[in-house]
């Protein structure tokens, strides 16, 4: 459907695949992943209510769980509703809102992971100053800054996309409204947006959090290697291994989704990468933290015991 007008009322979300035989399997897989993500992250939030987990690490982990639930819901709900209702249309304003929310939540996840890496750096490299620096007031201020920063930082590129008035088609070859597929169907000049997106992606969005996280782990690994006992080194590495696993997973999918060249890249490959980023990573986060973390498992056991005594 070719369109060339000053305003588009709605977009059509193409989805993951046009094959009618794949619609039910895709729906079931996405629904299963969504339910696991929801249950896993809610479990983390419940565990973090335990008084013994009222520490900076679990405070930021709770924030990460809220972001994972929100990000998955924002990006996956269209796949689920398309199968149930059969409607692929999304209004122009709903599309802009989804793009804004998803972009903000993606950056927020990176920034929170950066804060968590700094927390691990202080705990391992500056243990004597840890509780002084990472006090409750500081944790709340850092979290508030993260949330406020990302929801303001994403406004300029979204504002540029909102101002686009000409599109070659209103069909988006993706399973949700994202900034990259939208720029591929506009006939407006995208040079300003590309420059802005490149600058923000390299610095506030991805490069700065990546470099800060990388620097934290350079110091962490250097400190761990200085520990003389093997058991001490293993214990120190164990405290940050879950976070490091999540960081590697997230940055790998983000780089493949947004920073790989579009030339010669199949759009279906991009959609698979986006699905891994928006569905698989939020699902794996709570599994990685809960399965590898004795404190979380102990908190859940205490919570179950407390519930039984009340009944």
Image (cartoon, rainbow, N blue to C red):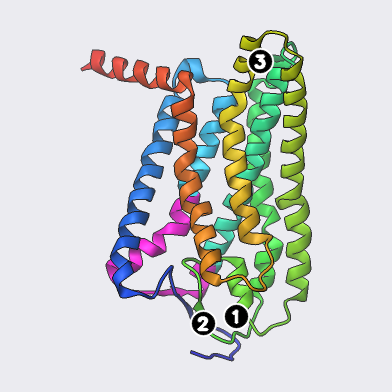
Determine whether, in the image, residue 37 is placed left or right of residue 94.
Answer: left
Q: Earlier in the sequence, mark 1 or mark 2?
A: 2
Single out the residue that lies furthest toward the front.
Answer: 230
Determine which quarter of the picture holds residue 29: bottom left
Query: Does the stretch in magenta take in 73?
Result: yes
Query: Does the stretch in magenta take in 245?
Result: no
- The residue under the point 59% across, 25% down is 57
- The residue under the point 66% across, 15% down is 233
Number of disc labels:
3
* Dominant secondary-structure state across the stretch colored magenta: helix
Q: Position of residue 121 (x, y in %)?
A: 71, 25
Q: Secondary structure at mark 3?
A: helix
Give the residues in magenta. 71-95
Single out the residue that lies furthest toward the left.
Answer: 311
> Looking at the picture, does residue 13 appear above or below residue 33?
below
Cα–Cα span, label 1 and label 2: 8 Å
Q: Position of residue 96 (x, y in %)?
A: 56, 68
Mark 1 and 2 residues: CB-CB less than 8 Å, in contact?
Answer: yes
Q: Earlier in the sequence, mark 3 or mark 1?
A: 1
Cα–Cα span, label 3 and label 1: 52 Å
Mark 3 and 1 residues: CB-CB less than 8 Å, in contact?
Answer: no
User: Which sits in the foreground, 235 or 53?
Assistant: 235
Please state which of the two labelled residues, at mark 3 or mark 1, is closer to the viewer.
Answer: 3
Q: Which residue is mark 3?
A: 233
Q: Secondary structure at mark 1?
A: helix
Cα–Cα span, label 2 and label 3: 56 Å
Image mark for residue 185: 1
Q: Earlier in the sequence, mark 2 or mark 3?
A: 2
Q: Which residue is mark 2?
A: 170
């Amino acid at each position: 459907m070719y369109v060339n007008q000053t305003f588009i009322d709605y977009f059509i979300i193409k989805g993951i695949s046009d094959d009618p035989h794949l619609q039910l399997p895709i729906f079931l897989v996405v629904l299963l992943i969504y339910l696991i993500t929801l249950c896993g992250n809610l479990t983390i939030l419940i565990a973090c209510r335990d008084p013994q987990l009222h520490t900076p690490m679990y405070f930021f982990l709770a924030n990460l769980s809220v972001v994972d639930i929100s990000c998955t819901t924002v990006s996956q709900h269209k796949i689920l509703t398309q199968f149930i209702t059969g409607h692929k249309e999304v209004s122009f304003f709903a599309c802009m809102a989804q793009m804004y929310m998803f972009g903000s939540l993606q950056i927020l996840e990176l920034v929170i992971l950066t804060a968590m890496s700094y927390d691990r750096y202080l705990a391992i490299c500056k243990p004597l100053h840890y509780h002084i620096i990472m006090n409750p007031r500081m944790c709340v201020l850092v979290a508030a800054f993260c949330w406020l920063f990302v929801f303001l930082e994403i406004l300029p590129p979204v504002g540029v996309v909102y101002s686009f008035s000409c599109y070659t088609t209103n069909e988006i070859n993706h399973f949700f409204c994202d900034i990259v597929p939208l720029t591929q169907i506009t006939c407006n000049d995208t040079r300003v947006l590309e420059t802005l997106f490149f600058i923000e992606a390299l610095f506030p969005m991805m490069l700065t959090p990546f470099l800060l996280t990388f620097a934290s782990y350079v110091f962490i690994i250097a400190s761990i290697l200085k520990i003389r006992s093997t058991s001490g080194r293993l214990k120190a590495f164990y405290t940050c291994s879950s976070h490091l696993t999540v960081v590697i997973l997230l940055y790998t999918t983000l780089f493949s989704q947004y920073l790989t060249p579009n030339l010669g890249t199949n759009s279906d490959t991009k959609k698979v990468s986006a699905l891994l980023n928006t569905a698989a990573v939020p699902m794996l986060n709570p599994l990685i933290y809960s399965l590898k973390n004795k404190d979380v498992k102990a908190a859940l056991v205490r919570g179950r015991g407390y519930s039984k005594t009340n009944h």
